[in-house]
Amino acid sequence: MPGFPAAGPPGGPQRSSAETYAQVQASPEFAALRRRWRGFIFPVSALFLIWFLAYVLLSAYAPGIVNTRVGGSNITVGLLFGLLQFVSTFAIATIYSRFAEKELDPEASRLRAEVEDSL
């Protein structure tokens, strides 16, 4: 396989799995995969943390806003924000799952197959 030489001929010197994994980690393909993963994870995590902290800070420091009733019912803005936390969590999980399946998994599977072939 390109980039990952085989472990060696039978009876000859064998490469350890640690050497193989170190070589994979240093490869440009692995670096590109990590860059794509980080390009998704860091911004989405930051946005979610900002959203969550806004909810917590509003609850702590702006009780007038979170206690505001919506449409004359017993539902408050704080309750809606709390429920939207669950919705956003499931939405992020779904979006990440689709992203990983489309953008990360094919390359990760290819790298895994190359490593398994070289061991």
Image (cartoon, grey):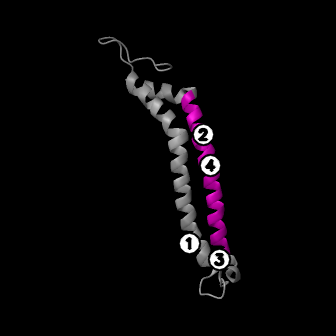
Tell me what residue is drawn at x 51 percent, y 33 percent.
Answer: 107
- Say few, some or many: other residues with alpha carbon within 10 Å of mark 3 (under 14 / 14 to 19 / 20 or more): few
Q: Earlier in the sequence, mark 3 or mark 4?
A: 4
Q: CA distance from mark 3 to mark 4?
A: 26 Å
> Callout 2 environment at 10 Å: few (<14), some (14 to 19), or many (20+)?
some
Residue 83's label in the rendered image is 1
Left/right placement of residue 78 relative to residue 105 reads right
How many badges with numbers are in the image? 4
**Residue 48 vs residue 13: left or right?**
right
Q: In which quadrant of the rendered view does residue 78 lie?
A: bottom right
Residue position marked by numbered label 4 in the rendering: 42
Q: Amino acid at mark 2?
A: Arg
Question: Label 3, on which residue?
Answer: 60
- Tell me which numbered mark, 2 or 3, is placed earlier along the sequence: 2
Q: Is residue 60 magenta?
A: no
Q: Is residue 38 above or below residue 82?
A: above
Between disc 4 and disc 2, the foreground one is: 2
Which residue appears at 34% of the width and 12% of the height? 9
- The part of the chain drawn in magenta is 29-58
